[in-house]
Amino acid sequence: MAAQLGQTPQTVQPPPVPPGIDAQTALYLQQFTMWCTNQFNTRLSANTALPGVMLQANDAPAGTVPSVFHLQVQSDGTLVANPLAIGTGSP
């Protein structure tokens, strides 16, 4: 559930490392979890609006690569979906 304006988002804790995992692997998993969390937090903020989102077509035939679109909302509320060329690096 999304946090309301003015509320502090809850921190989700990773699950505990299962018993039987050696200490070195457990430490690696904890550090990897922290790295993933930090990477997501620096890329996508849950508290900031985005200028657009990428979506893929959900009706592509099985075995084919679905089309990808960049969806944006204009100031008047109009939705604009522009096709993206996969692998170009920019919308």
Image (spheres, rainbow, N blue to C red):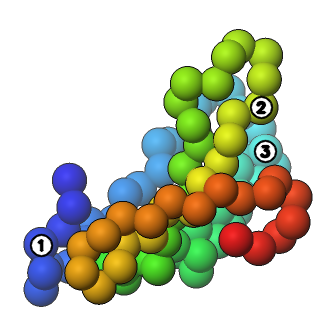
**Residue located beneath label 1 in the image:** 4
Q: Earlier in the sequence, mark 1 or mark 2?
A: 1
- Where does label 2 land, which residue? 65
| Residue 30 visible in the picture | no
Callout 2 crowding tier (Cα within 10 Å): few <14, some 14–19, many ≥20: few
* Amino acid type for the residue under numbered disc 1: Gln
**Residue contact at pointers 1 and 2, CB within 8 angstroms:** no
- Compared to residue 42, the image places residue 82 above or below, namely above
Q: Nearer the viewer, residue 76 or 89?
A: 76
Tell which circle, 3 or 1, labels the residue nearer the N-terminal end.
1
- Tag 2 secondary structure: loop
Between the residue at mark 3 and the residue at mark 1, the CA separation in whole angstroms equals 38 Å
Left or right of 56 on screen, residue 23: right
Q: Disc 3 vs disc 1: which is toward the camera?
A: 1
Toward the viewer: 79 or 10?
79
Q: Amino acid at mark 3?
A: Thr
Name which residue lies at 37% across and 58% down.
12
Q: Secondary structure at mark 1?
A: loop
Mark count: 3
Q: Position of residue 85 (x, y in %)?
A: 80, 57
What label does residue 25 carry, if any? 3
